[in-house]
């Protein structure tokens, strides 16, 4: 006698499987799309880092991109690139030389267009020079032969020997750094003469004023020819154990950064 299978079991065996196949296919596609996104993100980030390094090397006339670290932030660059600009970046430069000054620098910028002929929204550079590196510009700090250069408070303090008649008098001059007409300027602020500290004005108006004129003259260094013309020198000050030079590049066009400024003849 032949047994007949229940009708319900037959329907279960012949039930279509295509919905399950579609769901599996969509899941695989989604995984592939996610993987592709992160691979593309990695490629875009690598390209952007290289591009930023190249522009910095060209703008600051660096010998290579050694010692340059680029931080493009934690946002997705691929999405930023689709919008036409990078939200922000920071570049740390371990070794950079501007004229006679050598130090480190930090470059920050926001809303940087991928179109290098368009201006950035904001940009600035902080250039820091250590105390020991200031000896390289000692000839620019005073007309006298400089014997020592130190940083104290808000001053650059230079030690020298002043000739007064037949006497050689040790003197320490406190120079106040600043930015004036695009130059780094050093203005005498205090004088330590024969263990007595007085202001530059007091010395200038005193009996030895005519002999101390080399101490009292403000000195300056033009750095425009060493920097992109699009950058503006905004501030120079003593910051702890370093001389801090600040430059503003708001509205600068990336393609123009290779064009240097000029110093007066």
Image (tube, helix red, strand yellow):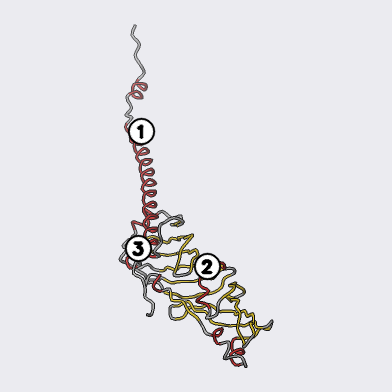
Label 3 neighbourhood size at 10 Å, few (<14), some (14-19), many (20+)?
A: many
- Residue 20: numbered disc: 1
Q: Which image quarter holds the C terminus?
A: bottom left
- Residue 113: numbered disc: 3
In the displayed structure, 241 sits above or below 159; it is: above
Q: Which image quarter holds the N terminus?
A: top left
Residue at the farthest right position: 195
Residue at the farthest top position: 1
Image coordinates of residue 187 in percent, x first then y, are: 53, 82
Image coordinates of residue 98 in percent, x first then y, are: 44, 68
Separation of disc 2 and disc 1 at Cα? 67 Å
Is label 2 in contact with label 1 (beta carbons under 8 Å)? no
| Foreground: disc 2 or disc 3 | 2
Is label 3 in contact with label 1 (beta carbons under 8 Å)? no
- Front residue of 203 and 83: 203
> Residue at label 2?
129
Label 1 neighbourhood size at 10 Å, few (<14), some (14-19), many (20+)?
A: few
Secondary structure at badge 2 equals strand
């Amino acid at each position: 006698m032949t047994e007949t299978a229940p009708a319900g079991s037959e329907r279960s065996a012949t039930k279509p499987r295509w919905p399950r196949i579609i769901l599996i296919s969509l899941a695989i596609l989604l995984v592939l799309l996610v993987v592709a996104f992160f691979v593309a993100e990695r490629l875009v980030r690598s390209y952007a880092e290289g591009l930023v390094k190249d522009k910095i090397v060209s703008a600051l006339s660096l010998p290579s991109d050694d010692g340059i670290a680029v931080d493009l932030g934690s946002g997705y660059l691929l999405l930023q690139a689709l919008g036409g600009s990078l939200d922000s970046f920071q570049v740390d430069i371990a070794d950079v030389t501007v004229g006679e000054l050598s130090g480190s620098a930090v470059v920050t910028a926001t809303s940087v267009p991928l179109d290098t002929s368009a201006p950035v929204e904001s940009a600035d550079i902080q250039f820091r020079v250590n105390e020991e590196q200031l000896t390289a510009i000692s000839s620019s700090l005073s007309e006298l032969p400089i014997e020592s250069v130190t940083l104290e408070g808000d001053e650059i303090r230079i030690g020298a020997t002043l000739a007064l008649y037949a006497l050689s008098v040790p003197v320490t001059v406190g120079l106040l750094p600043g930015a004036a007409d695009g130059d780094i300027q050093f203005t005498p602020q205090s004088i330590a003469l024969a263990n007595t500290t007085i202001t530059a004005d007091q010395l200038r108006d005193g009996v030895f004023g005519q002999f101390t004129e080399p101490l009292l003259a403000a000195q300056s260094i033009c750095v425009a020819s060493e920097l992109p013309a699009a950058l503006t020198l905004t501030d120079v000050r003593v910051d702890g154990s370093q001389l801090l030079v600040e430059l503003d590049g708001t509205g600068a066009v990336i393609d123009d950064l290779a064009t240097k400024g000029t110093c007066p003849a």
